[in-house]
Amino acid sequence: MFADLPDQTRPEPTHERRGEDFYPTGQPEAIRALFAYDGQRIRDCRKVWEPACGDGALVREIRALGMRCIASDLIDRGCPDSSVADFYAARRSPAGAIITNPPFCEISSKGRGRWLRHTLDMPGWDYLALLLSWDWPAGRTNGLGALLDEHPFSRCYLMRWKLDFTGEGNPAQRNAWFIWDRRDPRGPAHPKLHPDFRFMDRIDPRQEVLI
């Protein structure tokens, strides 16, 4: 998909994490809940791009929900029907919606919010959903705070259950979906510095809210 684009390398992380920050979203409840809450908005975009697809955990669910999903990653980790491509080599999104669990070292304050900055500068998308730790937007160092002040997310969904990214049990952190919607239904007059906050409950395969 990006074969004609120049190779670019990511900066080395300054802290010890898994190789290339690979933490697969193996629990389908996260993406199922996102579609239960924002499904029509996502479908309006017609296609989804997952640019950090890993082993395809999110991709398989998105496709099972009837959406065409373009999948890519810096490393081939076995995701079906995917391509090997550096996210930073992309100059335009190939889909109207981008949904991903981005490498945290690239989007956190330690990474200077590089992943988000590149995405916001990229044309071609209307809807962006990033799965991150709940406290991610509190980081203000290395320009992340200024970036979020200038480009606040439209809304976030605080997940009222915990995801186990490591498979080791007893996950410690809370997670949320952070949404940038270039067609925010509140319109251009909505307070720029006050993103919308919403709770998100877990959804079972029949799209019933679990208590």
Image: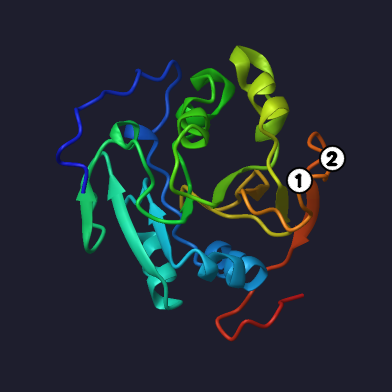
Residue at the spot 32% in from the left edge and 58% down from the top edge: 70
Q: Give above or below for 134 relative to 177.
A: above
Q: Residue farthest to the left?
A: 3
Query: What is the basis of the colouring in this image?
Result: rainbow
Few, some or many residues within 10 Å of mark 1 (<14, 14–19, 20+): few
Question: Would you name the residue on which mark 1 appears?
Answer: 188
> Looking at the picture, which amino acid does disc 2 mark?
Pro
- Looking at the picture, which amino acid does disc 1 mark? Pro
Image coords of residue 52 (percent x, y): 37, 46
Residue 57 in the image: above or below residue 52:
below
Say whether residue 197 is left or right of residue 77: right
Which quadrant is the C terminus positioned in? Answer: bottom right
- Mark 2 or 1: in front is 1
Q: Which of the 4 image quadrants contains residue 11?
A: top left
Q: Any mark on residue 174, and which? A: none
For the point 46% across and 55% down, the residue is 25
For mark 1, give the secondary structure: loop
Disc 2 crowd rating (10 Å Cα; few below 14, some 14-19, many 20+) is few
Q: Do the residues labelled 2 and 1 touch (CB within 8 Å)?
A: no
Where does residue 195 sit, x and y in percent of width and height?
Answer: 78, 43
- The extreme front residue here reads 188
Q: Position of residue 47 (x, y in %)?
A: 41, 64
Disc 2: which residue: 191
Q: Is residue 47 above or below residue 134?
A: below
Q: Is residue 55 visible?
A: no
Q: Which of 110 and 68 is in front in this view?
A: 68
**Camera-side residue of 4 and 72:** 4
Location of residue 146 by image quarter: top right
